[in-house]
Image (cartoon, grey):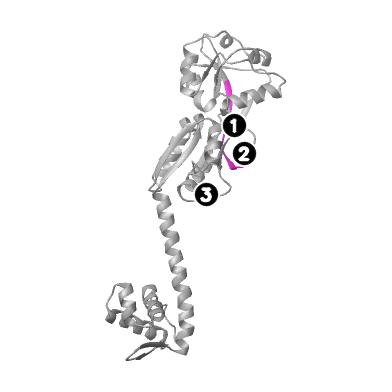
Amino acid sequence: MVQRRLPDLAALDVVVTAARHGSMGAAARELGISQQAVSARVRAVEHELGVEIFARSTTGIDVTTNGMVVLEWANGVVERASEFMTSVETLVAERQATLVVAASKTVAEYLVPAWITTLSHRVDARISVRPMNSTEVVAMVGGGEAAIGFIESPGPAADLESAVVARDELVVVAAPDHPWARRTSITVDELAATPLIQREPGSGTRVTVEDALAAAGRQAAEPSIELRSVTAIRAAVLASPSATVLSRLSVDDDITAGRLARIEVEGLRMPRALRAVWSPRITLRGPARDLLDIAMASRQLPHT
């Protein structure tokens, strides 16, 4: 049995176009090529398939009985090829478009930069990172203003899909000359009763602290100062007699260098999961999917 070659897709498209118009000349005009080129490609397809598709006459072309069967198949191939190219063009456009990433402050400052540096080596996409608190991240992703987000807060993230990308722990820190720094530990009651420098309401750090104290049967005192960034809180703690609670990701270097002192709290630990979130109404793909894969592959764990 003779092994037939699959005709060139462009040539099949010429055959389908000629059949639709019933004329080589009309097909040539639609495709922007010469009538001789149309005729040559049709004959090449017929030769490769071993089937006469058209009966030629002085008045035009008629589809043969075998040609009708071949054209039905050819139409399916051409349509699938068109869908394939449309999908590829969409994918390329997505990869070249701006990827908007909403990220809570700690994740935005200490994890996202490494992730997007890796991403930039893989895809040709513009990346815009919007630092904000976890509540704002959930609202932005849920509203379709960001393709993917990263949050620190515990509990449900509205109706969004989520995946853990890192593990973190909150710790109490103060300047080295703070009275707490000279002690082995403090009690949960002392921590709860002391006004701290805190993040704003809605931040993952603030929610985690309040939840941890509530689980211990305590209510956090009103903050002495509220600030919206880790950097601002760190600077305020170094310049004041106040303490704060921050992510170990943000203060481990300061603790090691002696710029900040870690304060142990008896019977209290504040671990948390850092999560990626995205809308369940879309399929995460392109650069957003790549970013999630990068984050998942480089899971950050707190030092022991």
Instruction: Give the image quarter of residue 247.
Output: top right
Q: Outermost residue toward the front?
A: 59
Q: Amino acid at mark 3?
A: Leu
Which marked residue is nearer to the observer: mark 3 or mark 2?
2
Q: Amino acid at mark 2?
A: Ala
- The numbered dot on residue 158 is 2
Part of the protein shown in magenta: 159-171
Q: Nearer the viewer, residue 69 or 295?
A: 69
For residue 218: magenta? no
Residue 137: x and y, percent?
53, 35
Q: Return the disc, 3 or 2, that comes first in the chain's sequence.
A: 2
Mark 3 Cα-neighbour bin, 10 Å: few <14, some 14–19, many ≥20: some
Tell me the chief SS of the magenta region: strand
Mark 3 to mark 2 CA distance (whole Å): 18 Å
Q: Amino acid at mark 1?
A: Ser
Residue 243: x and y, percent?
55, 14
Residue to which mark 1 is pinned: 153
Left or right of 123? Residue 72 is right
Q: Return the disc, 1 or 3, that comes first in the chain's sequence.
A: 1
Say which element carries label 3: loop
